[in-house]
Image (tube, rainbow, N blue to C red):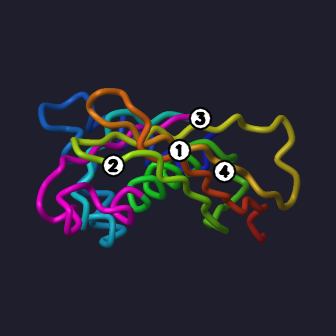
């Protein structure tokens, strides 16, 4: 069972509508405003996987005209967090604990971040959950590889 059935249900409802992916993305950014700085669009959200896209536009570019490293980190954290939210049991909560990042190539095109995780069989009372995030360009080239470590623990009663 997902931790946030409301988030997953909202995605399932919105994604069936014309412009529904945009609507869902806007609602997520309304709840967590900082993510609005990259104008993300959700393409996939399901337990174990999320995919978020951004367009290469001026507001996410650096001084050399490529997508800024922190914009890519922002999209990696967004994908990892929402995917974690719909993956963990309803009895648990999560918070990002850390992120390691490898910048592999200049990001010269639109991008998509794909967050994946293999959920453990036993969630236990507290654990690190490493979420792998790949950021790919329009040519399917890997430009950034991140691991977002989520601290997952049982909710206090």
Q: Mark 3 falls on what kind of element?
A: loop
Question: In the rendered structure, which segment of residues is drawn in magenta?
Answer: 49-72
Q: Mark 4 falls on what kind of element?
A: loop
* Lower position in the chain sequence, tag 1 or tag 4: 4
Q: Mark 2 falls on what kind of element?
A: loop
Residue 109 image label: none
Q: Are marks 1 and 3 in contact (CB under 8 Å)?
A: no
Which image quarter: residue 117? top right
1 or 3: mark nearer the eye: 1
Residue, disc 1: 133
Q: Residues within 10 Å of mark 4 (few under 14, many from 20)?
A: some
Number of marks? 4
Check if residue 51 falls in the magenta segment.
yes
* Lower position in the chain sequence, tag 3 or tag 2: 3
Residue, disc 2: 106
Question: What is the distance, in whole Å, between disc 3 and disc 2 at their CAs?
Answer: 28 Å
Check if residue 150 falls in the magenta segment.
no
Residue, disc 3: 48
Q: Are marks 2 and 1 in contact (CB under 8 Å)?
A: no
Question: What is the distance, in whole Å, between disc 2 and disc 4 at their CAs?
Answer: 39 Å
């Amino acid at each position: 069972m997902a931790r946030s059935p409301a988030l997953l249900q909202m995605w399932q409802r919105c994604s069936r509508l014309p412009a529904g992916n945009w609507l869902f993305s806007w609602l997520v950014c309304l709840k967590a405003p900082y993510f609005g700085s990259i104008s993300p669009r959700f393409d996939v959200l399901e337990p174990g996987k999320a995919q978020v896209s951004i367009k290469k536009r001026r507001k996410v570019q650096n001084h050399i005209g490529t997508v800024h490293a922190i914009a890519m980190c922002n999209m990696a954290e967004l994908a990892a967090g929402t995917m974690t939210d719909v993956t963990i049991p309803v009895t648990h909560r999560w918070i990002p604990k850390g992120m390691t990042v490898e910048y592999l190539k200049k990001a010269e095109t639109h991008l998509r971040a794909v967050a994946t995780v293999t959920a453990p069989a036993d969630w236990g009372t507290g654990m690190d959950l490493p979420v792998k995030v790949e950021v790919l360009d329009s040519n399917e080239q890997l430009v950034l590889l991140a691991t977002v470590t989520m601290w997952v623990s049982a909710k206090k009663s």
